[in-house]
Image (spheres, grey):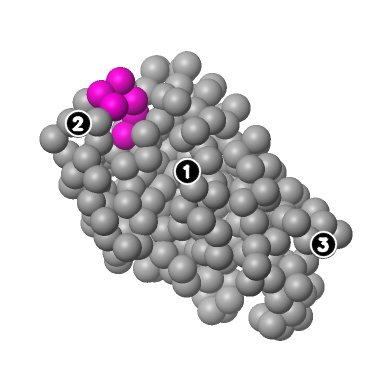
């Protein structure tokens, strides 16, 4: 089923954490909202370098009306703060990338899984499966500041587990999942151009590689 284009010239969306309002003017584009944490909002890079912003440049059929990602957010925060804002934004397409701070906070796998179920089911009340795309969490342990969060092996294992949980939850609902993000991020172990100035988050160059993996999936979804 082809994704429904939503004309919304009178709808106002909140873009980024700063809370600035901007109207959607492209009536031929699908209203896109990005949900997530620091990786979604693009901590330590410019707004234009964030992967959602790069994505809409690559996929003209999408218009980013709101990037709701917030630095430090875990799955429970997405539920409490980001999901309630969706109805006013009236998205036709949503991406979800969440879990890194669940690992950092040592949230149990059971609690994370329960939150993922709530998030995905809430989205499917609003959108068809092809209107949702989920992304794996990258491996921050390979970055210069990754060691600040404890044992790299333990942290990496935690990231791998949440990626499996999210991927399986997506598969059960017919939602596409992009696992390649994890492998792409590991190249930062030997290529510091893929790391932002804070020594922890991805650089705009790494986000561009993410978009290379994400964009083909969205093109497929737009044609279904």
What crowding class fits label 1: few (fewer than 14 Cα within 10 Å), some (14-19), or many (20 or more)?
A: many
Is disc 2 placed on a helix, strand or loop? loop
Give 82 or 44, whichever is nearer the viewer. 44
Q: Nearer the viewer, mark 1 or mark 3?
A: 1
Please tell me whether residue 62 is drawn above or below residue 18 in the rendered image.
above
Identify the residue at image location x=48%, y=39%.
133
Q: Nearer the viewer, mark 1 or mark 2?
A: 1
Q: Earlier in the sequence, mark 2 or mark 3?
A: 2
Residue 103: x percent and y percent?
59, 72
Q: Are marks 2 and 3 in contact (CB under 8 Å)?
A: no
Q: Which residues are magenta?
A: 26-31
Residue 87: x percent and y percent?
20, 46
Give 129 or 54, whichever is nearer the viewer. 54
Circle 1 is placed at which residue position? 53
What crowding class fits label 3: few (fewer than 14 Cα within 10 Å), some (14-19), or many (20 or more)?
A: some
The reply to whether the magenta stretch includes residue 28 is: yes
Give 99 or 19, whichever is nearer the viewer. 19
Circle 2 is placed at which residue position? 8
Dividing the picture into quarters, in which one does residue 28 lie?
top left
Residue 159: x percent and y percent?
65, 64
Is disc 3 placed on a helix, strand or loop? helix
Identify the residue at image location x=60%, y=27%.
216
Label count reads 3
Identify the residue at image location x=63%, y=43%.
208
Circle 3 is placed at which residue position? 189
Identify the residue at image location x=17%, y=39%.
11
Dominant SS type (magenta): loop
> Quadrant of the image for the N terminus?
top left
């Amino acid at each position: 089923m082809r994704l429904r284009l939503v004309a919304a010239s009178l709808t106002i969306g909140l873009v980024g954490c700063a809370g600035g309002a901007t109207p959607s003017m492209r009536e031929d584009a699908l209203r896109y909202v990005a949900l997530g944490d620091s990786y979604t909002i693009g901590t330590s890079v410019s707004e234009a370098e964030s992967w959602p912003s790069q994505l809409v440049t690559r996929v003209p059929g999408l218009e980013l009306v709101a990037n709701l990602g917030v630095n430090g957010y875990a799955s429970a925060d997405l539920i409490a703060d980001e999901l309630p804002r969706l109805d006013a934004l009236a998205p036709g397409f949503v991406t979800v990338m969440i879990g890194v701070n669940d690992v950092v906070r040592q949230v149990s796998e059971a609690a994370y899984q329960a939150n993922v179920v709530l998030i995905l089911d809430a989205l499917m009340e609003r959108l068809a499966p092809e209107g949702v795309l989920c992304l794996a969490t990258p491996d921050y342990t390979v970055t210069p500041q990754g060691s600040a969060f404890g044992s790299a092996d333990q942290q990496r294992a935690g990231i791998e587990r949440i990626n499996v949980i999210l991927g399986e939850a997506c598969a059960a609902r017919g939602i596409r999942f992009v696992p390649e993000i994890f492998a792409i991020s590991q190249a930062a172990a030997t290529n510091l151009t893929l790391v932002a100035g804070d020594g922890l988050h991805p650089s705009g160059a790494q986000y561009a590689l993410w978009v290379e993996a994400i964009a083909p999936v969205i093109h497929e979804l737009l044609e279904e």
